[in-house]
Image: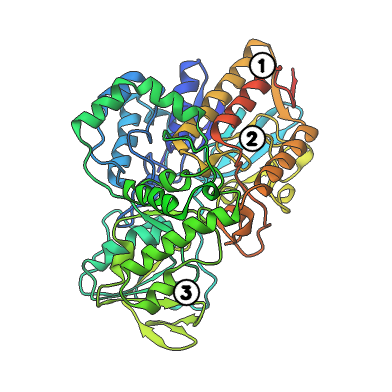
């Protein structure tokens, strides 16, 4: 149990994932007293918790890494094209060790409340351990996918076998050998873990409500020549990623899918399928996320692939998504996902035809049958982007509750600050590129912006900064306008908050592009923090 204490700090950081660690390093280097708090027992954030079999990043490892230290870039060696969770967690621990970050992190500690004091112009932060911290600034580096949710199924608590959430797998792992296993959900974590679980279990039953589009990762060990080529031009690689749409390097499409023949489109999509990167297919043409007819062409291509791979035509058709355009739900990269359904002990249950009625002490009962299991895996997602923020009891000016203020949907300025909540920053918050980007690129940009902002206040003799309501309203309107020009709002996705009953249906991230967003943030600073109220 960490020692209880009361402290005065310049900055409280909530979270010790990559964002929290970089904040400590950056702010400490500028001379600020800073401490991070995390409910986990060590660093890593998302990659600390997501230990399910097959957990892997869907951004190339050579780009899913920090760029702030050239020596770090050159010394760290990634082993695979797409890194596994254990390797990314080793990288996180290496960061903590290399920059000696742990002395400024309090683990096994949850932030209970954050109350703004108008008179003192400071935050009072209380923790689950009884700490009371006086802080000038609070930075929420809580992660966008860090509030896991269970499905709304009667009887979950009655099951007497083993059950796990993919986001909270035990460190020691789970032995599936000879077990009857159920996986509920077919999102990213399920698509990654299903092929792994199938290797050793006796029986695997996958319960699917909504099929998803998934592409082969084509994962492989990294060759020395490939690594050296990237490292020799890391500055150029990083700059291209910062200026790109999704925060990753790759070709920039300048042509509509409807301007070429079907044969040409198929050839291009096959190249992307073989390449094993989401941007290779989703970025093949410049209108795939804005034009339904163009998107249908790639959707048809993927559905044909599913039918080619999955031998049973009924199962294949059930795995074919029809209710959302490609990319408007989080698309997945997999290793043998569709092939897994050709194994004799693997079965798909289509919940659109037979819903789950309840979970009993030993089984899952649907409208058609009852199946007994030894283990149930819930791969049922998160209260994304806002859940981990509003789960903290936060009150700003005049005692206004952030949770209450966001009851009809989040409202931020740039995804960085909220009107009425001075000196409270969010890293990759709602209405920023966030989950639609290479998170490492977006994390670095936000941390640099926040650190520069805090330092600007000190140099100018100022105590507070907050978003103005007008600027916030205009940014929210702009975010919604940009989203409306795309196909994203057509899907009932966690991007829209649709997976959480009662959550407002609004498009949560900013889809204007990583490079354009960075330009807007820089322009606002150059204009004297336009849209922010600064005060001493």
165 w.r.t. 153: above or below? above
Q: In which quarter of the image is residue 138?
A: top right
491 w.r.t. 341: above or below? above
What element does badge 3 sit on? helix
Between residue 42 and residue 496, name the one nearer to us.
496
For marks 3 and 1, give the CA distance: 53 Å
* 396 left or right of 151 in image: right
Q: Residue at x 59, y 40 (%)?
A: 429
Number of the label disc, if any, that sits on residue 124: 2
Q: Residue 333 location, x and y as percent?
A: 37, 52
Q: Residue 253 location, x and y as percent?
A: 49, 38
Q: Mark 1 points at which residue?
A: 526
Point out the tag, 3 or 2, that comes first from the N-terminus: 2
Q: Nearer the viewer, mark 3 or mark 1?
A: 1
For marks 1 and 2, give the CA distance: 31 Å
Q: Are marks 1 and 2 in contact (CB under 8 Å)?
A: no
Q: Which of marks 3 and 2 is in front?
A: 3
Q: Mark 3 points at which residue?
A: 156
Instruction: Pick the quarter of the image with the C terminus.
Output: top right
Q: Are marks 3 and 1 in contact (CB under 8 Å)?
A: no
Q: Quadrant of residue 208?
A: bottom left
Point out the tag, 3 or 1, that comes first from the N-terminus: 3
What element does badge 2 sit on? strand
- Neighbour tally class for label 3: few under 14, some 14-19, many 20 plus, Cα within 10 Å: some
Instruction: Pick the quarter of the image with the N terminus.
Output: top left
For marks 3 and 2, give the CA distance: 38 Å
What element does badge 1 sit on? helix
Is residue 160 visible in the rendered image? The answer is no
């Amino acid at each position: 149990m960490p020692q209880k204490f009361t402290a005065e700090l310049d900055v409280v950081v909530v979270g010790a994932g990559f964002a929290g660690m970089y904040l400590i390093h950056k702010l400490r280097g500028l001379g600020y007293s800073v401490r991070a708090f995390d409910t986990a027992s060590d660093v890593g954030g998302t990659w600390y918790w997501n230990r399910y079999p097959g957990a892997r990043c869907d951004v190339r490892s050579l780009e899913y890494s920090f760029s702030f230290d050239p020596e770090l870039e050159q010394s760290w060696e990634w082993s695979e094209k797409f890194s596994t969770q254990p390797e990314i967690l080793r990288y996180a621990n290496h960061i903590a060790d290399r920059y000696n970050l742990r002395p400024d992190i309090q683990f096994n500690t949850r932030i209970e409340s954050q109350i703004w004091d108008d008179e003192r112009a400071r935050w009072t932060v209380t923790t689950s351990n009884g700490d009371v911290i006086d802080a000038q600034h609070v930075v929420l580096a809580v992660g966008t996918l860090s509030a896991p949710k269970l499905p709304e199924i009667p009887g979950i608590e009655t099951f007497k076998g083993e059950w796990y959430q993919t986001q909270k797998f035990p460190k020691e792992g789970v032995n599936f050998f000879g077990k009857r296993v159920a996986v509920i959900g077919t999102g990213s974590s399920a698509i990654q873990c299903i092929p792994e679980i199938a290797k050793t279990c006796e029986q695997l039953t996958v319960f699917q409500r909504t099929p998803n589009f998934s592409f082969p990762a084509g994962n492989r060990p990294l060759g020395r020549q490939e690594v050296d080529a990237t490292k020799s031009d890391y500055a150029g690689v990083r700059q291209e990623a910062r200026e790109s749409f999704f925060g990753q390097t790759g070709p920039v499409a300048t042509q509509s899918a409807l301007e070429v023949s079907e044969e040409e489109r198929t050839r291009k999509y096959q190249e992307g399928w073989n390449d094993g990167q989401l941007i290779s297919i989703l970025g093949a043409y410049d209108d795939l996320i804005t034009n339904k007819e163009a998107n249908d062409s790639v959707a048809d291509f993927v559905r044909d692939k599913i039918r080619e791979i999955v031998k049973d035509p009924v199962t294949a058709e059930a795995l074919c998504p029809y209710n959302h355009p490609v990319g408007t739900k989080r698309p997945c990269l997999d290793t043998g996902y569709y092939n897994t359904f050709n194994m004799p002990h693997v079965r798909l249950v289509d919940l659109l035809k037979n819903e789950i009625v309840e979970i009993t002490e030993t089984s899952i009962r649907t409208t058609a049958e009852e199946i007994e299991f030894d283990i149930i895996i819930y791969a049922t997602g998160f209260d994304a982007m806002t859940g981990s923020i509003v789960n903290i009891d936060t009150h700003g000016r005049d005692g206004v509750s952030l949770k209450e203020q966001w009851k009809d949907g989040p409202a931020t300025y740039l995804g960085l600050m909220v009107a009425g909540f001075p000196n409270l920053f969010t890293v990759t918050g709602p209405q920023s590129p966030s989950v639609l980007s290479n998170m490492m690129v977006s994390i670095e940009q936000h941390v640099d912006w926040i650190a520069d902002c805090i330092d600007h206040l000190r140099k100018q003799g100022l105590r507070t900064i907050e978003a103005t309501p007008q600027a916030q309203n205009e940014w929210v309107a702009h975010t919604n306008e940009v989203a409306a020009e795309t196909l994203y709002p057509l899907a009932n996705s966690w991007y829209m908050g649709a997976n959480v009953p009662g959550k407002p249906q609004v498009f949560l991230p900013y889809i204007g592009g990583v490079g354009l967003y960075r330009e807007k943030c820089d322009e606002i600073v150059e204009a004297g923090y336009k849209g922010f109220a600064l005060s001493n």
